[in-house]
Image (spheres, rainbow, N blue to C red):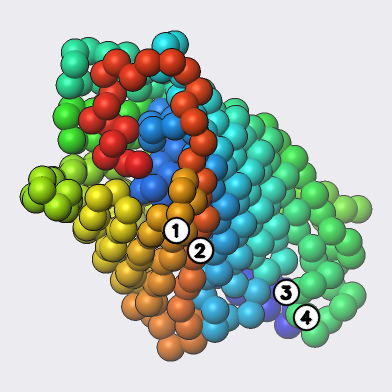
């Protein structure tokens, strides 16, 4: 019976992974795009630091909880962006800790057109605590008696193309795609770090220059081999780069609303609320994501070119 129970749990986890859950899921990544694409490291004006807390599926015990800290900035005089990201992602009996550094280089094709290349290298620590599994047969040899832990190097690559107020990006998280073996006595299990493919496009339309009112539609497509593709669609309005309000749709999962405001000085706060519309809607509850951001000064001197790019995503 225990083997059947665990098999069902693992099948369910695999299905969730197929929906891109192997990567931490964020509802406000458009404010902090280098979370998914290292080419956008430092794309915003100044140096930006963010704290993120996400609670997904509040109605399900052991549902994913993600905490993250990021900081990134850009050296204008060197056309180089640098960033650091740390996240902790807990899903029931599994937990992942990631520490990543990012590097991006900007190539100016002309005054309005830029091409960015980026790479992320980091350390990923995966843990599975079988002692927390709810089982009927405590002697089943398929369940390890203690926490299993494996660490691995990880890498992401990305490219971003900007033309005036249009931005197109493509990235490959978990590029190495390692297969981790967890062994105890004569029992062996495996955890596969699957390579993902992400494509994004966004356009900022300033429809009222006097009031500085802008509308920005965005889209993201996630794909992993042998699984269905997932896409996000977002429409976001902003006023004077001080207040943002948006609505979103994530395929086969949720619709959401989000908001962000500048509180005072360089401090801002954001909140996203997702309403589940998938088959889990009767038991999953909702998802919440909180974000706190702070902007520091410029890393490098000068602001030649790139002004359109930075102003858009500030």
Judged from the image, the secondary structure of the residue bearing numbered disc 4 is: loop
Considering depth in this image, is 123 or 131 the residue closer to the camera?
123
Tag 3 near tag 2, CB within 8 Å: no
- Quadrant for residue 260, please give it: bottom left
Task: Report the Cα–Cα distance between label 1 and label 2.
Answer: 14 Å
For the image, the number of numbered tags is 4
- Quadrant for residue 272, please give it: bottom left
Judged from the image, the secondary structure of the residue bearing numbered disc 1 is: strand
Task: Report the Cα–Cα distance between label 3 and label 4.
Answer: 9 Å
- Location of mark 3 (residue): 3
- Location of mark 2 (residue): 290
- Location of mark 1 (residue): 263
Residue 256: x %, y % from top left: 33, 70
Residue 130 is left or right of residue 205, and the answer is right
Residue 265 is left or right of residue 67, and the answer is left
Question: Where's the C terminus, which quadrant?
Answer: top left
Q: Is residue 191 visible?
A: no
Q: Earlier in the sequence, mark 1 or mark 3?
A: 3
Which residue occupies 30% across, 58% down? 244
Residue 61 is left or right of residue 293, and the answer is right
Q: Is residue 132 visible?
A: yes
Does residue 18 sit above or below 277 in this rendering? Answer: above
Q: Which mark is residue 135?
A: 4
Residue 164: x %, y % from top left: 17, 29
Residue 80: x %, y % from top left: 45, 17
- In front: label 1 or label 2: 1
Task: Report the Cα–Cα distance between label 1 and label 4.
Answer: 48 Å
Task: Report the Cα–Cα distance between label 3 and label 2.
Answer: 38 Å
Residue 88: x %, y % from top left: 66, 53
């Amino acid at each position: 019976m225990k083997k059947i129970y665990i098999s069902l749990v693992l099948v369910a986890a695999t299905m969730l992974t197929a929906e891109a859950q192997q990567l931490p899921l964020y509802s406000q990544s458009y404010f902090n795009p280098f979370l998914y694409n290292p080419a956008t490291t430092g794309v915003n004006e100044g140096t930006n630091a963010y704290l993120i807390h996400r609670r997904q599926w509040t109605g399900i015990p052991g549902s994913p909880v993600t905490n993250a800290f990021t900081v990134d900035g850009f050296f204008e005089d060197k056309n180089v962006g640098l960033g650091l990201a740390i996240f902790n992602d807990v899903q029931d009996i599994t937990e992942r800790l990631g520490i990543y550094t990012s590097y991006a280089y900007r190539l100016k094709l002309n005054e309005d057109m830029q091409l960015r290349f980026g790479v992320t290298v980091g350390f990923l620590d995966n843990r599975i605590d079988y002692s927390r599994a709810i089982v009927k047969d405590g002697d089943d040899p398929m369940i390890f008696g203690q926490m299993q832990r494996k660490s691995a190097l990880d890498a992401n690559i990305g490219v971003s193309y900007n033309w005036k107020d249009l931005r197109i990006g493509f990235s490959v998280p978990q590029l190495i795609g390692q297969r981790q073996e967890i062994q105890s006595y004569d029992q062996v299990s495996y955890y596969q770090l699957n390579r993902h493919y992400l494509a994004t496009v966004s356009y900022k339309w300033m429809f009222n220059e006097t009031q500085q009112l802008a509308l920005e539609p965005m889209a993201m497509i996630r794909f992993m081999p042998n699984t269905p593709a997932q896409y996000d669609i977002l429409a976001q309005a902003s006023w004077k780069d001080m207040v943002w309000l948006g609505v979103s749709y994530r395929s086969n999962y949720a619709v959401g609303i989000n908001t962000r405001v500048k509180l005072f000085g360089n401090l801002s706060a954001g909140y996203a609320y997702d309403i589940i519309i998938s088959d889990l809607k009767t038991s999953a509850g909702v998802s919440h994501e909180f974000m706190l951001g702070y902007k520091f000064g410029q890393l490098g001197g000068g602001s030649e070119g790139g002004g359109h790019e930075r102003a858009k995503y500030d």
